[in-house]
Amino acid sequence: MAGDSGRLSAGIDRLDAVLGGGYIEGRSYLLHGPAGSGKTILAFHFLDACEGDEQPLFINLEEELSDLQANAEALGFDTDAVEFLDLSPGAEAFAEDQSYEVFTAADVEQEPLAEAVTEAVERVEPDRVVIDPVTQLRQLIGDSYQFRKQVVGLMRYLKAQGATVAFTVQETRNAPSEDLQFISDGYLTLQTDGDQRRFAVPKFRGSATKSGEHAYRITGEGIEVYPALSPGDHARSVTAETLSSGIGEVDQLLHGGLERGSATIISGPTGVGKTTLGTQFAHEAATRGERSVVYLFEEARNTFVQRSEAIGIPVGDMVEAGHLQVEEVEGLDISPQEFAATVREDVEEHGAELVMVDGLAGYRITLEGEDEMVHHIHSLGRYLKNMGVTTLLIDETSAVIGEFRATEDNVSYIADNIVVLRHIELSGEIRKAVGVLKKRISDYERTLREYAITGDGIQVGEPLTGLRGILSGAPEFVDGGGRDPLEEE
């Protein structure tokens, strides 16, 4: 039963959102993708969404019916509520005359398939029809022109009966399906690349759809959809204020702290203390009674907790009090769209006010290239800014010392603030320095300070005015002096 909008749910809420409310009643839609991409599952979702006195009909042209039903039931679909018209070839079709032809020419000429469909439609009077796969008709009919003619006639007949149709196609090299794209009112194209599954809606007559490449996952309950993030669709008002780090010297570098709703990149080489500095901001947020979420792409959750508590940041207590959520994320198992959906849920349903992504190198694994990296990070950062969420992005640079790079993936333009951490070698010791490279909203201190992580937490010293070349990792004393300014503090 269609709602007031003349839409029929596709059976997946987020897919309905992509389609602008669902399929348009009385039209036909093509589900296109390789074997194993989930086309049939998507079709069962459509039938499972029947409401009230709606009648579903599944026209099966290929898979053995008992296997089809068993697979659907394993995913939780109620096959008893679906009327099946089984036109799949039985084993006896191959035994007759020792032939591998499923139907003889005489069978086609007598149009037993058309008669079977007509009888089923008149008997069931379906509101929703699935044909799986319609390309099997090409094998039965043989001639491409007759195949297209038959499919057009079938779609017009079902439309005249008031049915909304979803039909799947199986693409093969010798039998492309481009002609079916013109026949349909819209189509979804599914793609698989290892564990990554994506889909797009290139055509959808009569309605706008969410553009972009969306992701999906096949689970034990069918298909989960993760739409591409559209930052412009989300916004809320935010009170302008500066958020302290809880460390006086860091706040001095930042002229008070970070502005609420701003995006900050904390960059530096491995082991310099980037995650610890980000966690300190989450700790200070907890003292204000605010909720933070840390997404760990590169570190185990237990290691993060133990390491933080060893320097006096009570992560365990913060989690127990509901002020911090720590999520371990495996970049190889998640798409950027799915990650964005997770962030949205934590922000919109669980009230996260600070989000830390640790780190961008691990996040990069979910993507295919640098251009895609910039696109998805930009969308995520813009969404969080629009929602007033303070964002920390941890970016590991490759060089420990030597040539200085602010960020590793040309994402610095996304940030309102860039805080850099560096290893430096001085007087035969490896030390660390911290500074602010960029602050878009306010002024900032342009000096560098020594940075150390101790059992009592983060310690930051006075400005290193007696040194130059700190960003290179090998500083020199100003004016050739030999005294270590760090010893004077």
Image (cartoon, grey):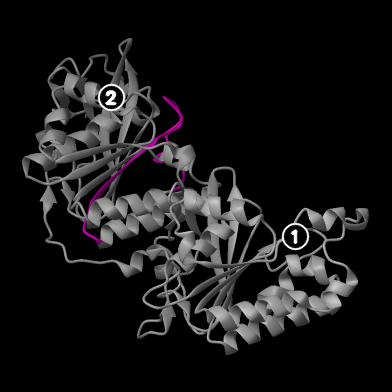
Where is residue 244, by image quadrant? top left
**The residue under label 1 is which amino acid type?**
Pro
Disc 2 marks which residue?
Answer: 302
Residues at marks 1 and 2, CA–CA distance in whole angstroms: 55 Å
Residue 308 lies, in percent from the top left, at 21, 25
> Residue at left 34%, top 23%?
271
> Residue at left 79%, top 76%?
147
Magenta stretch prevailing secondary structure: loop
Of the numbered discs 1 and 2, the one sitting upstream in the chain is 1
Residues rendered magenta in the picture: 387-410
- Between residue 422 and residue 83, name the one nearer to us: 83
Q: Is residue 471 visible?
A: yes
Farthest residue, direction left = 288
> Residue at left 33%, top 50%?
342
Q: Is residue 252 visible?
A: no
Q: Is residue 307 left or right of residue 110?
A: left
- The quarter of the picture where the C terminus appears is top left
- Between residue 15 and residue 363, name the one nearer to us: 15
Q: Is residue 406 left or right of residue 33?
A: left
Q: Secondary structure at mark 2?
A: helix
Q: Is residue 475 left or right of residue 246?
A: right
Disc 1 marks which residue?
Answer: 89
- Between residue 147 and residue 179, name the one nearer to us: 147
**1 or 2: mark nearer the eye:** 1
- The quarter of the picture where the N terminus appears is bottom left
Residue 301 lies, in percent from the top left, at 30, 29
**The residue under label 2 is which amino acid type?**
Asn
Query: Is residue 393 rendered magenta in the image?
Result: yes
**Dots 1, 2 in contact, CB < 8 A:** no
